[in-house]
C-alpha cells in the first residue's frame, strides 16, 4: 500500500552527486482576493432581513418535501435548519411564514452587488448562486491598507442589510473555501495548513462523492489530500486535485470578469408641440447621433432601439426597430428611422421624444482599406431587408424554408431572413402551386411518378394522393395527382 503524502507536498531530494539548485529570491505577491458569501440571499432577495425575529423560511419549490434554503434569525432560534423539509418545519412552528425561492430576483440582486463592488476594484467575478470574488490587491494603497479595506467592505455590506461572510486569500479558490467556512484571513505562507483544517463540506462535493469520503472516515481537507494523488484521481477524478492546486496557487485559475450591460437612453423636449414627423425628424437625428457616439466610446453596437413620442393628453406612441445584424453606423441607423417615420401617423402632437437602445453588444468592425470597395453582398442584403421592414412592417418581409411535412400545402414555412434553410427531401416538385387544385376531365399524359403522399391523419388536412409529372400537347409540364378515394385527377402546379 503506497504511503500517504504529507501536506503540503515536499520537493523530491536532490541526488547526492548533484548540487541543490540555488534558492530563488522570494517575491511578495500583491494578489489578494476577497470572497463575499451571502448565505441569506434567497431571503434577502424577497425583501426580508436575515436578523428578523419572525420565523421566516425560504423553500425550494412548493411541494411538502421541498427543502429549506434560507432562514431568518427567528426560524433558526426555533430549531429549523437548512435542508429541513417544509412539512417538518411547519409541524414544528405554527406561525412559520414560508416563502418560495425566486431565482430571478437572486440573480438580479447578485448582479446589483457586482456593480456595487466595482467601487473597490474593476476585477469582479460572480460565483452563482450567492458569492462574489473581488481582486483587491491593487486597491490597498487607494483605501489605506488591507485592514481598512476589509472593514469598509464589511461596513457597507451591513449598511445594505445583508448578512455576509468575508474572507481574504492570495487565490480565488482559497478565498471561496475560507468564506464558506467562516474564516476571514488566509496567510500565503501557511495557506495549506489553514485550508487543511476546513471541513469537507467546504468543497460542495456531489452527494455521492461526499458519502464515499464519509465512509472512508475523511472529514477535513487535510485528510482528503493526504491520500495518494494517483488513487484519488482514479477514484474521484482529476478535478478535485486541480481545485486543490488552484487553491494553493500551483495552478492558474481563469475567472469570468463581470461587466455591466450598458444601454443608451436620452430625451429631448420639443420647443413647441409638433405633429408632423418631418419636423420631428431633426430632433430624432440628434438623439441617434448621441447614440452612435456612445457606441463608438464603448466599441459596441446594438440590434434594437425604441423611440417614444410623448403627448400632452394621450398615452405615448412607441416605435420599435429590430436590426438583423449588430450595427453602430450613424447613417444606417438614421436611414432606418427615417424610413419608419415616413409611415408613422401620430395620434396627437408630440411634446417630447425619448430614445432607448437595446443592451450594447460587442462587435468586430469592418477593416478599413486604402482602396474604396463596394459593400459585401450579405451586408447589402441585410440593409435592404432592414429598410423594407422599416417601410412595410416587420411581418411583411420574411424568407421561405422547407418544413417537415410531405403535404405540398404545408411543406413550407416562414422564417427570419438570413436563416440557412435545409435542403428539401422531397422528389422533384414545382415552385408554382395553384391556390386550389383544378379538376381535370381526362387522364393526362404521364412522364414520371408516382410520388405517393398519405399524411395529415393527425389533423384536419388528411389526404391520400399519387403525384405525377405530366406533359401537355404543347410541351408544358404539369404537376398532377390522382386522389385515392375518388380516383379523380387534379392539376396542382406548373413547372417552369
Image: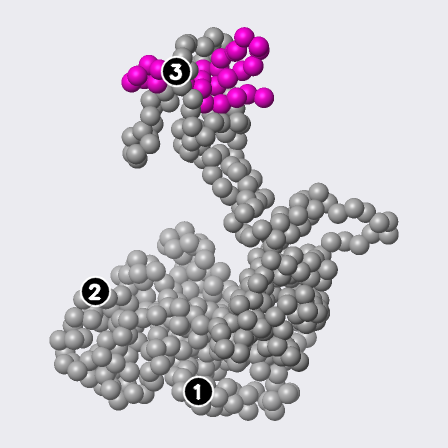
Front disc: 1 or 3? 3
Q: Tell whether position 494 is magenta.
A: yes
Q: Residue at x 30, y 16 (%)?
A: 486
The disc label shown at residue 160, or none: 1
Front disc: 2 or 3? 3
The disc label shown at residue 63, or none: 2
Magenta residue span: 468-496
Q: Nearer the viewer, residue 311 or 13?
A: 311
**For mark 3, does the 10 Å Cα neighbourhood hold few (<14), some (14 to 19), or many (20 or more) residues?**
many
Please give the residue where the numbered disc 3 appears in the rendered image.
Answer: 489
- Residue sticking out furthest to the right: 370
Q: Nearer the viewer, residue 410 or 489?
A: 489
Q: CA distance from mark 2 to mark 1?
A: 32 Å
Q: Residue at x 42, y 64 (%)?
A: 225
Q: Look at the image and tell me whether residue 284 can be seen.
A: no
Query: x%, y% of residue 186?
Result: 49, 79
Q: Mark 2: which secondary structure? A: loop
Counting residues from the start of the chain, the first of labels 2 and 1 encountered is: 2
Q: Nearer the viewer, residue 183 or 317?
A: 317
Counting residues from the start of the chain, the first of labels 2 and 3 encountered is: 2
Q: Residue at x 30, y 35 (%)?
A: 459
- Left or right: residue 346 versus residue 185 is right
Q: CA distance from mark 2 to mark 3?
A: 61 Å
Q: Mark 1: which secondary structure? A: loop
- 462 vs 291: above or below: above
Q: CA distance from mark 1 to mark 3?
A: 79 Å
Q: Residue at x 66, y 45 (%)?
A: 381
Amino acid at each position: 500500500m503506497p504511503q500517504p503524502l504529507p501536506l503540503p507536498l515536499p520537493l523530491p531530494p536532490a541526488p547526492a552527486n548533484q548540487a541543490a539548485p540555488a534558492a530563488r529570491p522570494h517575491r511578495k505577491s500583491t494578489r489578494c482576493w476577497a470572497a463575499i458569501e451571502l448565505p441569506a440571499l434567497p431571503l434577502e432577495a424577497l425583501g426580508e432581513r436575515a436578523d428578523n425575529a419572525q420565523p421566516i423560511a425560504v423553500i425550494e419549490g412548493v411541494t411538502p418535501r421541498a427543502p429549506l434554503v434560507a432562514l431568518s434569525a427567528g426560524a433558526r432560534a426555533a430549531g429549523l435548519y437548512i435542508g429541513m423539509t417544509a412539512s417538518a418545519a411547519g409541524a414544528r412552528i405554527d406561525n412559520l411564514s414560508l416563502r418560495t425561492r425566486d431565482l430571478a430576483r437572486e440573480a438580479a440582486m447578485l448582479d446589483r452587488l457586482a456593480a456595487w463592488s466595482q467601487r473597490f476594484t474593476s476585477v469582479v467575478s460572480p460565483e452563482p448562486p450567492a458569492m462574489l470574488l473581488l481582486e483587491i490587491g491593487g486597491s490597498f494603497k487607494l483605501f489605506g491598507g488591507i485592514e481598512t479595506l476589509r472593514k469598509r467592505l464589511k461596513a457597507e455590506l451591513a449598511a445594505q442589510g445583508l448578512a455576509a461572510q468575508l474572507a481574504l486569500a492570495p487565490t480565488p479558490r482559497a478565498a471561496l473555501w475560507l468564506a464558506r467556512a467562516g474564516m476571514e484571513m488566509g496567510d500565503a505562507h501557511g495557506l495549506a495548513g489553514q485550508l487543511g483544517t476546513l471541513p469537507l463540506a467546504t468543497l460542495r462535493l456531489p452527494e455521492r462523492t461526499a458519502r464515499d469520503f464519509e465512509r472512508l472516515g475523511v472529514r477535513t481537507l487535510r485528510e482528503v489530500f493526504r491520500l495518494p494523488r494517483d488513487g484519488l484521481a482514479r477514484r474521484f477524478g482529476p478535478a478535485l486535485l486541480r481545485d486543490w492546486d488552484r487553491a494553493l496557487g500551483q495552478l492558474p485559475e481563469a475567472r469570468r470578469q463581470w461587466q455591466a450591460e450598458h444601454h443608451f437612453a436620452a430625451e429631448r423636449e420639443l420647443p413647441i408641440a409638433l405633429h408632423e414627423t418631418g419636423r420631428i425628424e431633426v430632433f430624432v437625428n440628434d438623439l441617434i447621433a448621441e447614440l452612435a457616439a456612445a457606441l463608438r466610446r464603448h466599441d459596441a453596437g446594438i440590434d434594437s432601439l425604441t423611440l417614444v413620442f410623448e403627448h400632452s393628453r394621450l398615452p405615448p406612441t412607441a416605435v420599435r426597430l429590430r436590426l438583423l445584424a449588430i450595427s453602430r453606423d450613424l447613417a444606417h441607423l438614421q436611414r432606418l428611422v427615417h424610413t419608419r417615420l415616413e409611415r408613422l401617423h401620430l395620434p396627437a402632437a408630440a411634446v417630447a421624444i425619448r430614445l432607448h437602445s437595446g443592451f450594447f453588444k460587442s462587435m468586430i468592425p469592418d477593416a478599413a482599406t486604402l482602396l474604396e470597395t463596394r459593400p459585401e453582398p450579405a451586408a447589402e442584403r441585410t440593409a435592404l431587408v432592414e429598410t423594407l421592414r422599416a417601410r412595410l412592417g416587420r411581418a411583411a418581409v420574411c424568407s421561405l424554408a422547407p418544413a417537415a411535412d410531405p403535404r405540398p400545402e404545408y411543406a413550407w414555412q416562414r422564417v427570419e431572413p438570413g436563416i440557412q434553410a435545409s435542403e428539401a427531401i422531397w422528389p422533384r416538385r414545382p415552385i408554382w402551386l395553384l391556390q386550389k387544385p383544378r379538376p381535370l376531365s381526362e387522364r393526362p399524359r404521364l412522364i414520371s411518378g408516382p410520388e405517393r403522399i398519405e399524411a395529415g391523419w393527425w389533423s384536419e388536412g388528411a389526404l391520400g394522393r399519387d403525384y405525377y409529372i405530366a406533359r401537355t400537347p404543347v410541351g408544358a409540364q404539369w404537376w398532377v395527382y390522382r386522389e385515392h378515394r375518388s380516383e379523380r385527377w387534379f392539376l396542382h402546379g406548373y413547372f417552369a
